[in-house]
Amino acid sequence: MARAARKKASQAPEKTTRIQEINRRLILDAALDVFSTYGFRGTTIDQIAEKAGMSKPNLLYYFPRKQNIYVSLLEETLAEWLAPLADIDPEGDPIEQLRKYITLKISMSESHPEASRLFANEVLHGAPAISDFLATHLKPLVDEKAAVIRRWVGEGKLAPVDPYHLIFMIWATTQHYADFDVQVRAILGSQVGRHGFREQTAQAVLSVILNGVRPRD
Amino acid sequence: MARAARKKASQAPEKTTRIQEINRRLILDAALDVFSTYGFRGTTIDQIAEKAGMSKPNLLYYFPRKQNIYVSLLEETLAEWLAPLADIDPEGDPIEQLRKYITLKISMSESHPEASRLFANEVLHGAPAISDFLATHLKPLVDEKAAVIRRWVGEGKLAPVDPYHLIFMIWATTQHYADFDVQVRAILGSQVGRHGFREQTAQAVLSVILNGVRPRD
DNA sequence: CAAAAACTTGACTACTTGGTCAAAATGCAG
DNA sequence: CTGCATTTTGACCAAGTAGTCAAGTTTTTG
């Protein structure tokens, strides 16, 4: 009880040592792999520990509860995941901004499919761990960008379209390739891995969505 | 050993009684609810049994393994889920056919979100139980319809677009509203439940995708 | 209306798994 | 080098859960 308060009495600055930094990283990396594949319930602490190369009690020394690992992981992932949306420039050219956003999302879907799946799984199961985040961080950001899109529509720079549904469509289409990877592979076979597949995907998605929102004259 | 062979020696016709029919239905309905919410690992047999209003051993009398319930459920769901795609008429008007398909998918996403989530969860986790189905049933059907779309493009009835990616986009956008329901609700709030929300969704999705593939002249 | 078949269930087993603990090993400041 | 703090782990425990079983109850059938 008095032990923890030895150095810095009232504050709790929790200095992290070198070893802690290394091991937390090892654990989170391993956990991302396992959680994204098997889901929260489907993942055992032993699996994570094994993949991280340490014993279960040792892992629990860093994250006392399974939940802790999971939540830390989600928090870490979410910020990164949302960044591209925040980057949409209200003063930029609408079609160009959307192109950039979609392209970035498809890249992320290809380079970090586990992160996409982790998130998808969480939301699919009712977002028990992040409903707070959705309300306090995601919603305001989306509201803000939806307003921008709505303004663009008002200025005639985009065809009339509900901005929220447009954002949902972009999320859905881009994340589909990460989340439903097995299905895409079952249908497209070997060409999924082939060089240039991402470009082909981006080209198809961009062409439909951008043509879909380009103002008709 | 000889007991089962009493009536029909070599064949195994497995006649189903009235009670069997009722109880299997009760179990599958309950299981859909629970599996779609908690996933395979996250679901306990007791939960299903309780929801179905029977004891666990009784449930296991009908489905000796948890897996059996899950697989039966998926099989039952998949056929129904694919029907609208099969219904695309190669001789119909392309835009009209796509409109019909998208509209139907959005309806299903709203009326059977659990089925959508069950399937999404399975695919998200690598489709261990249905990779076979994907290869032998889904792929041929998609190949067939992709060929139709490709022909339409060739005839200038649709803007040039990769047919497979177009199909993926339709799946992604329509199922998004079932699979990511909590996220949609977190952002749109109460209007999700409101009368006319489905129409608004359909309108937005249709407008972007159909304009996206409508030939430009 | 019996007797057989089909159905139902309480009690139980075997196993998995999240988490604990005390003791040992290692790292590190003075 | 020494003593304290941090890190590591083998052994263990308690809870939860898939599946069994034998004994009962209900339904069907001749």
Image: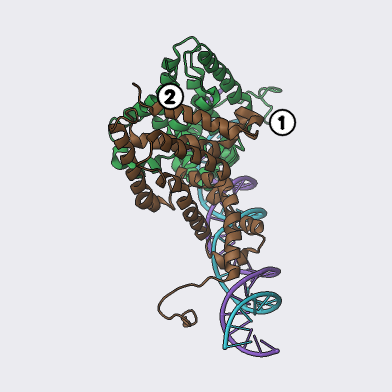
Chain colours: A green, B brown, C purple, D cyan
Q: Which residue corresponds to mark 2?
A: A212
Image side of residue A192 versus residue D16, left or right: left
* Quadrant assignment for the N terminus of chain A: top right
Residue drawn at x 48%, y 40% is A36
Residue drawn at x 52%, y 30% is B203
Which chain is disc 1 placed on? Answer: A
Q: Which residue corresponds to mark 1?
A: A2
> Label for residue B4?
none
Q: Quadrant of residue B89?
A: top left
Q: Is residue A146 above or below residue B98?
A: above
Does residue B210 appear in this view? Answer: yes
Residue drawn at x 44%, y 74% is B12
Image side of residue B89 versus residue B24, left or right: left
* Quadrant assignment for the C terminus of chain A: top left
The answer to whether marks 2 and 1 mark residues whose Cβ atoms lie closer than 8 Å is no
Tell me the kind of residue under disc 1: Ala
User: x%, y% of residue B109?
Assistant: 53, 41
Q: Quadrant of residue A185?
A: top left
Q: Is residue B128 above or below residue C13?
A: above
User: x%, y% of residue A181?
Assistant: 40, 40
User: x%, y% of residue A31?
Assistant: 49, 39
